[in-house]
Amino acid sequence: MGLLDNKTAIVTGSSRGIGAEVAKILAGEGAAVVINYRQKAPRANKVVGEIQAAGGRAVAVGADLTTQEGVQALASAAMEEFGSLNVLVLNASGGMESGMEEDYALKLNRDAQINMLNAAVALMPEGSRVVFVTSHQAHFVETVPTMPEYEPVARSKRAGEDALRELLPNLADKGISLVVVSGDMIEGTVTATLLDRSNPGAIEARRAEAGKLYSVAEFAAEVAKMVTADVESGHTEYVGGADYFGKSA
């Protein structure tokens, strides 16, 4: 018996990286998983194939979370494909990509998170859980300066976290818990790659400060743990290196 047998999870931004690894772990615990991608269907379908090959259940859904249509499509897919929705992992984020509109970071990292939560909560029963994935650089941005190239993303992610926390009373009324997972820079992620490209040596410097940076798989395991962890709603789980920011992990 898995911890998530007969449960359904949506993992946003799960065609690669942390989201894909979280989705695979949750499927291994028995959850049916909705894999979300924005443009790269083959990558998402590969994740679905890996889950199914291991005996799990999954479906890939293309959805741009900065649109209401995308948010609704993702929420609806859980019910249409699997008949329930019990877990929402808000992993999708961005803002360092080239060619996006000026306010894209805020639209994705704040507005889309709230819209996705509201669409999901309407379908989630009592006892469900929402997990928001962020970085120490965003979580502590008000007190610890971050790299200039990352600051717009960090501030938009902090705005998203604040907006989600404002909904804690509403979630409590429905018996739904929200947990925040904050991690250091993660080796091998798109954000780390883009950051190192715009600020060469930034990741190496952070690695030296922290002593170690988590890999994608290591961090994903910590995120997945918080789906079933016995913690209070509103809890922040610090993963690696938070003492540098003034918080003992």
Image (spheres, rainbow, N blue to C red):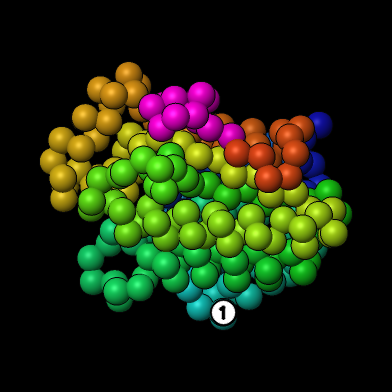
Q: Position of residue 10 (x, y in %)?
A: 63, 56
- Of residues 115 and 170, the one drawn nearer to the viewer in this rendering: 170
Q: Secondary structure at mark 1?
A: helix
**Horizontal arrangement in the rendering, residue 243 relative to residue 77 (left or right):** left
Whether residue 188 appears in this view of the structure is: yes
Q: Is residue 20 visible?
A: no
Q: What residue is shown with label 1?
A: 68
Closer to the camera, 41 or 9? 9
**Which residues, given as a range, are shown in magenta?**
237-249
Question: Does residue 109 lie above or below 49 as drawn?
Answer: below
Vertical arrangement, residue 6 with respect to residue 208, above or below: below
Question: Which quadrant does the N terminus fall into?
Answer: top right
What's the residue at 52%, 70% (across, down)? Answer: 111
The answer to whether residue 92 is left or right of residue 145 is right
x then y, percent, for residue 130: 67, 51
Q: Residue at x 54, y 54 (%)?
A: 161
Identify the residue at the far top of this view. 211
Left or right placement of residue 151 versus residue 220 in this view: left
Q: Nearer the viewer, residue 3 or 111?
A: 111
Which residue is located at x 35 percent, y 73 percent?
A: 103
Q: Amino acid at mark 1?
A: Gln
